């Protein structure tokens, strides 16, 4: 999912990492960008924050999710991963609200992956409030409670902050990773996480 009309698939680079990928330093300006101005971070001192910028409607994010989940299980103890739904236009806001509502209701573990599947495997149009609410209710979630949180000012504020963070990291497409408030890694298949690991190591140096 790109802000501009890009056509390359996230996984165009292939599903297997080249043998030299682990030994060659990532190239600035090609595989990652260094931010001219630090982006805000929420991780406590001593922790390195990694942010995944995603959109539920993005097929590349759907394909990337299993890779990220596997990486999350094995990430170092000093790394904190958080997800941020993007908004390249006002049409993205309902999906942002969906994510933050699931987060507030402690439903992400159960339904985050299910949202991706519903959109990309089941072809459901979960991009506006009506279909989103009906789908969530079918998952056994209380309609009134979901609607209350989905439409709340607190959820709207989280969506606005997500958009501001997206701009701070100069995100142009999804999925993308923000590293330690200092680097942006555009989606490049499995290599995205190879680059992230290298930049995490650099961030540890201070």
Image (tube, grey):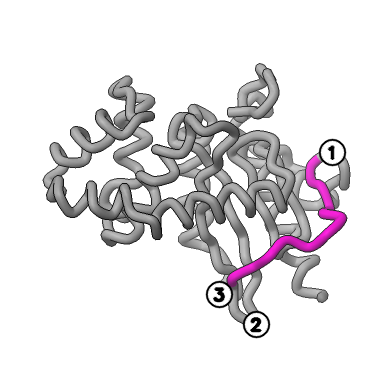
Task: Name the quadrant of the N terminus.
Answer: top right
Q: Which of marks 1 and 2 is nearer the N terminus?
A: 1
Q: What element carries label 1?
A: loop
Q: Are marks 1 and 2 in contact (CB under 8 Å)?
A: no
Q: Which of 82 and 189 is in front in this view?
A: 82
The percent position of residue 42, horizontal first and vertical second, equals 59, 70
Q: Determine the image quadrant of residue 103.
A: bottom left
Q: Which residue is drawn at 65% across and 82% down?
A: 45
Q: Which of marks 1 and 3 is in front?
A: 1
Give the residue number, with chain letter if any, for mark 2: 45
The percent position of residue 27, horizontal first and vertical second, equals 87, 45
- Is the stretch drawn in magenta largely helix, strand or loop? loop
Q: Which residue is drawn at 56% across and 55% down?
A: 161
Which mark, residue 30?
1
Give the residue number, with chain letter if any, for mark 3: 77
Disc 2: CA contacts within 10 A as few (<14), some (14-19) or many (>=20): few
Q: What element carries label 3?
A: loop
Q: Nearer the viewer, mark 3 or mark 2?
A: 2
Disc 3: CA contacts within 10 A as few (<14), some (14-19) or many (>=20): few
Q: Magenta segment range? A: 31-42
The percent position of residue 116, horizontal first and vertical second, equals 37, 35
Disc 1: CA contacts within 10 A as few (<14), some (14-19) or many (>=20): few
Q: Do the residues labelled 3 and 2 touch (CB within 8 Å)?
A: no
Q: What element carries label 2?
A: loop
């Amino acid at each position: 999912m790109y802000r501009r009309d890009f056509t390359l698939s996230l996984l165009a680079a292939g599903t297997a990492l080249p043998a030299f990928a682990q030994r060659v330093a990532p190239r600035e300006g090609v595989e990652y960008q260094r931010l001219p101005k630090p982006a805000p971070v929420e991780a406590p001192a001593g922790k390195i924050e990694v942010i995944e910028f995603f959109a539920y409607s993005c097929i590349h994010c759907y394909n990337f999710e299993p890779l990220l989940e596997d990486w999350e299980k094995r990430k170092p103890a000093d790394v904190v991963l958080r997800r941020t739904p993007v908004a390249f236009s006002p049409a993205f806001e309902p999906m942002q609200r969906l994510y933050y509502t699931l987060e507030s209701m402690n439903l992400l573990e159960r339904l985050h992956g299910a949202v991706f599947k519903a959109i990309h495997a089941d072809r459901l149009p979960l991009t506006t409030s009506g279909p989103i609410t009906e789908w969530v209710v079918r998952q056994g979630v209380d309609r009134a409670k979901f609607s209350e949180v989905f439409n709340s000012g607190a959820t709207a504020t989280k969506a606005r902050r997500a958009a501001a963070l997206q701009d701070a990291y100069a995100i142009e497409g999804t999925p993308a990773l923000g590293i330690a408030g200092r680097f942006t890694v555009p989606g490049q298949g499995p290599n995205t996480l190879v680059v992230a690991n290298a930049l995490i190591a650099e961030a540890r140096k201070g």
